Image: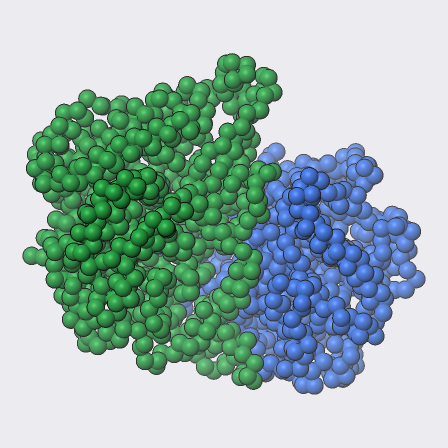
Chain colours: A green, B blue
Amino acid sequence: MTSFFSKFKPGTSPASPASSSLPAKKDPNAPQPTPLEKLLQDAGPLRADGTDKFFGFENFGSTCYCNSIIQCLYYSVPFREHVINFPTRSPPEALEKSPQSPLLRLNTDLLPISNGHNSALSPKGGRNSISSPGGASPRKPVTTPAATINAQGLKPEDNKDSPEYKKKMAMAAGPVLTMDYENANAYGMSESLFSALKDIFEAVIAHRSRIGVVSPHKLLEILRRDNEMFRTPMHQDAHEFLNILLNEVMENVEQFSKNRPLENGRADGDSKALTVTSGAVVPDRSSTVSDSIGWVHELFEGTLTSETRCLTCENTSQRDEAFLDLSVDLDQHSSVTSCLRKFSEEEMLCERNKFHCDKCGGLQEAEKRMKIKRLPRILALHLKRFKYTEDLQRLQKLFHRVVYPYYLRLFNTTDDAEDPDRLYELYAVVVHIGGGPYHGHYVSIIKTQDRGWLLFDDEMVEPVDKGYVKNFFGGENVLACAYVLFYQETTEEAMLKEQEAENAAAASQATEPHHEPVTVSPTKTNGVANGHPLHHPTTPAVEVDDQFSSLNHAATAPPIPADQHHTLENITTSIPILSPRKSNLQSKKEKAEKAKEDKEKKAAEKELEKQAKAKRKEMETQRRANSRKQEDDLKAAVEASKSSKVEEDKRRHDPTSEEHNEKNGHDKENGHGTFGKSSLSRFRHSSMSIRHKPKFWPSGKDKHESDPKEHDSPAMPGAEALNGTPSGTPDKPEKEKTKNRFSLGRKKSTFHL
Amino acid sequence: MFVLPPPPRYPAPGHPGAPGTGPLIETNNTLTHPTGPQHQLVVGEGTYVLRDDLHLATPPAHPSEAPVHNPNPLATTISPPSVGTKLSLVIIAPRQSSYARLYKLDTTNSVRSPVPPSIQESPHESNSQASDAGSHSANGIAPTPLEGLHAPAFGEGNPLLSMVNGKESKDPLKRRKPKSNIVKSNSSFVSRVIPHEALSKRIAEHNPHGIYAFANVNRALQWLDMSSPIKEEHMTKILFTKAHALCHDINQSTKAANHIDIVMGFSTGDIIWYEPMSQKYVRINKNGVINGSAVSEVRWLPNSENLFLAAHMDGSLVVYDKEKEDALFVPEDQTPAAEVAPNERAQRKVSFAVKKSVNSKTQKTNPVAYWKVSNSKVNGFAFSPDCRHLAVVSENGTLQMMDFLKEQLLDVFPSYYGEATCVCWSPDGRYVVTGGQDDLVSIWSVEERMLVARCQGHNSWVTAVAFDPWRCDERNYRIGSVGEDCRLLLWDFNVGMLHRPRASSVRQRNSITSATLKMQRSRTESSVTRLRSNSNLTTASVGVDEDEVEVVHPLEPRARTAMLPPVMAKAVDEHPLRWLGFEEDCIMTSCEKGHIRTWDRPKEGASSEEGAPSMKSGSNS
């Protein structure tokens, strides 16, 4: 850090190809290098590990939940490493060659449809041609508050400090990686969220530019195909997405390794053929695969031990549960530490929540507490800001001020936990901006390996001050609050090293907030023992602080939604009952359509996937000793998921229409209860929240899960969906069929015109 | 005389991007008297009852910088560092210390008092004991005067310093005042000064045993007479243009009926020495000429008329002389080589460096001394009652113990995690207590140079800690802490319970680490004796010390640390608390939004009788 900062001078000639190509353009719209470009001006040679890539993600209309989470995962070093190396890293030549011959060979070769645009990603000409689809038309995120409330007749993107403008410029500047192809076969896998994620990561890493925008078409396509709740163009829950993504990735990885021996024999010729067409060499992957299939578990999974003491017979029973993230309840004016402690506080199981004691053989009052037995390497903390309020019959956003430190240890470990004093550092924060759970915007703020903290707001990436992270504690009148926190394990040595390096810069930031005429040159120079005067009172701190000064005035988010009435009015719908009947009908229809759609291959794959899913599900159910109910739910979910796909596709047809949104909002409300539970049950690893009783306790209470009145808190398993994302389903089946399954592609294509 | 307008309800000022920032008109303070069980603190010794709640009016933003309404919640505008209301208290009259009553036993006979307890109150508590410290020798510690007074003055060895002092101190009785009049000032730094219309009358009528308080709120600093029947009316209110006063301290050794020296540190790095009675002031470190980062803490050096120490947010500690001119600061490479010498045993790189020593040859201008204690923000510091040591807490989560007379770093202790935010000394100087972002109050033994206990009970970060000197004796200590969770917690600990190992089974498992602990312990044993002898010597022992420079202590695992529960925990405000003070008759708290609450101690009588024996029995167990 320090060395980088001190090296940086405004006059420095740009070293990286990315930045060199920029100023070449004399375009009134693209005058100044962005803060990010400045930051990367002397970045040196490209790295193969992806640590020097800072790509925004295109927003296709409320897909910020996906963008923010994927960014957080990309900048987790171990996660990224595993993704690109599993089952094997894509042919090294691809990465090595990339500087000369712009990678997207992968892209173009495999999927000719994605056309010359991408292959033209050459330093000079490429930028224009690529960006034309995106840059030419105003790219307004459809449901971002900015687009809906901008009543003053002044386009938000006219203001050069506005995030809209910056996003537009980011798209225009490109390069845009249109991820509408899939390399799954080259990996020897079937198409899945994991392969789509891997495609994205590899494309980003292999690309010769350090900055750019990713259009994650394929990933969203797969996500929406498999999860009906994400099919609406509505605001979704980022935590829910994280959970699904991690589960899917885990499942994809495991399935791959399970099928591999089989596949190796069968599909050998297949993959060879692919190898030829893609020009990629698929090396022998057998060595790498076997020992690394559990890496998602290793990274994110921890173990909770719940101890229950029956108050009647004093018998204590223990149960271990795996978790991928922890969902904690919030209190006003509390800290993450205390939320976690509350999570593990002793709790009485009484009245309706009585505990079924095996020893006494009946429902008994009991004391229960959950502690962490195995600490995850990456601790994803979900702050439950969306709480179900009984009297309003809907979710409400909690604006409680909850502080989180940069470093954390866990107090709520069991006595026999290994390394109970493990040190975690905060490396990413997903921020939800908005007044309620049904609308708003997600961004993430991420600590990168050697570029400090960056703000990722869809297409836009901007360096921010370390202290910026503290702006999202929440509190009254603060619309932007932290929603998911990512802590990764670290060591004291690493912490000290970083403090040495980073604090010099951070401290100097603190000195200049006032922009007094006389500012002091930052403290970085303090350490320099060259007799250089520590501070020049008469020198404004332009030189070294340049990259920050521009930052100080950056306005980086869409304006606050001023008018939320239409959404709010619709939210008061009560939770409806399951409506499985229509699923059957719809599923037939859908199958027919699928056939038409010339996707037999995919269907087959899907079938396989489904089977595996069911298998896994079974195992999981066993492991959790869960009731059979859940399995049924799964089936219902699958059916329901299929059924609603058609309508969903239809409805995404015109996502820009305001009225339509309103309707969707309404639909979503109804659909939400319907599928919330069933879709939830497909999570093998749910997030753990303290109120999850019925999940952990086979107390036969499950039947009431989806009834909110049963629960003192919204965090019940059934309420997971309540707590999280409302999933959208129309209450009226729409008869009209649409061919295009994904509005994304469609939307994009309209821009071509 | 005043017709008070109804106080408007203010929206919360300040959060970046928050709609509605601050009031638009100047308003008056309000005083309320909430009653009811929710405004009582029930502790063993009795019930503390809320006397009143004084809400300081948040001043409107200066016209020159009308708040830019930025609706963008992601705006990367860096807001200036701000803190909630903090108080500096002073009682003009010399008073008998509380300790004289509480230290009933002859501590020299006590086995557990290797260090003569110095009863002078820590400056952290901003009390009045420092000046009349001589009267405490009555407690039978030693025939010598109080240790604190006996300690050499800072910079005593430097003739250049003493010369300056000597030259000007021809009339020691007449306090020197700053030179500029703040009311008539045309400085752009000071926006407005609003004295009370009957200021001189109020000063004249002030009960010398009553408390004067100085409190910052937003860009204002208010001088309040807490004993006045109209205490909600400020004595003087100073509005600064842009800068916020983040910290202030009153010199307890120069206070007089007609003289109070107060020094304030600002978010801009400027420091003001202000004398409220004469309305005179001087601006030091003007425009950050010496150090341009915000001042997070400022304290007068114990028993010094002129010198004070300021902590800048870039990790520098700077000693200023209130009467010296500023000069561009150039680090002097006098001693750093010796000081920064890497310690073999330390895994933590110690970044302590003396940029300018008090023994420097150039002492005509400020700074008097300049130490770089870390690269991260210093959150607070406190002087030991024996006036030799300094405890510094920083954003990087360390507690650093310094011998500031020798300008030497002694110990570096890590917090459990997160920033260390506040620090104070026990009245006898044996313990240091810190609070931090780990939600813990940590107790450190100065003699044994180790962590003694962690106190768990806050639901959020701890923002201030203080000892209640009126409820401390040589074995029992009362600590108070406030935090972001709006709660006040009281803790009792006594020496008997402190060193109890927590879980023997755990010890076996970590046998390696516990072995190192033992080693460290045995080493610190020797250092205890060394420290003790030091404090009895004056300046001769420099050579002895050289071999043992800084000790960087490893983290104490949670499994091996004693955990202390609070004796009382209660939400005492609706807003995160920022400051806590113990007075003879009350506890005072202040919050982020300018509420100052005063809690009367339990009435003399049955309840207080109850409290004392319970403490005793605790110590015997």
All told, the count of numbered labels is 0
**Which residue is depicted at the point 38% across and 30% down?**
A620
**Above or below: residue A572 compared with residue A744:** above
Q: Nearer the viewer, residue A259 or B257?
A: A259
Q: Residue furthest top?
A: A361
Residue B193 at x, y = what percent? 54, 67
Percent of width and height locating residue A4: 43, 73
Q: Which one is nearer the viewer's eye here, B202 or A721?
A: A721
- Residue B15 at least partly seen: no
Could you tell me which residue is drawn at 40 percent across and 76 percent down? A8
In this rendering, would B560 be left or right of A199?
right
The percent position of residue B152, horizontal first and vertical second, equals: 80, 72
Instruction: Tell whether B197 sits left or right of B383.
Output: left
Quadrant of the rendered structure where residue B507 is?
Answer: top right
Relative depth, front residue between A478 and B250: A478
Above or below A22: residue B48 = above
The C terminus of chain B is located in which quarter? top right
Q: Quadrant of residue B142?
A: bottom right
The image quadrant where one finds the N terminus of chain B is bottom right
* Most distant residue in the front direction: A265
Indicate left or right for A676 with A517 as reference.
left
Q: Quadrant of residue B415?
A: bottom right
The foreground one among B150 and B207 is: B150
Is the residue B162 above or below the residue B530 in the image?
below
What percent of the width, then of the height, locates residue A51?
37, 62
- Judge whether residue A214 can be spotted in this image: yes
Using the image, determine if residue A149 lies above or below residue A674: below
Name the residue rendered at 12%, 59% in the picture: A115
Residue at position x 54%, y 51% in the image: A423
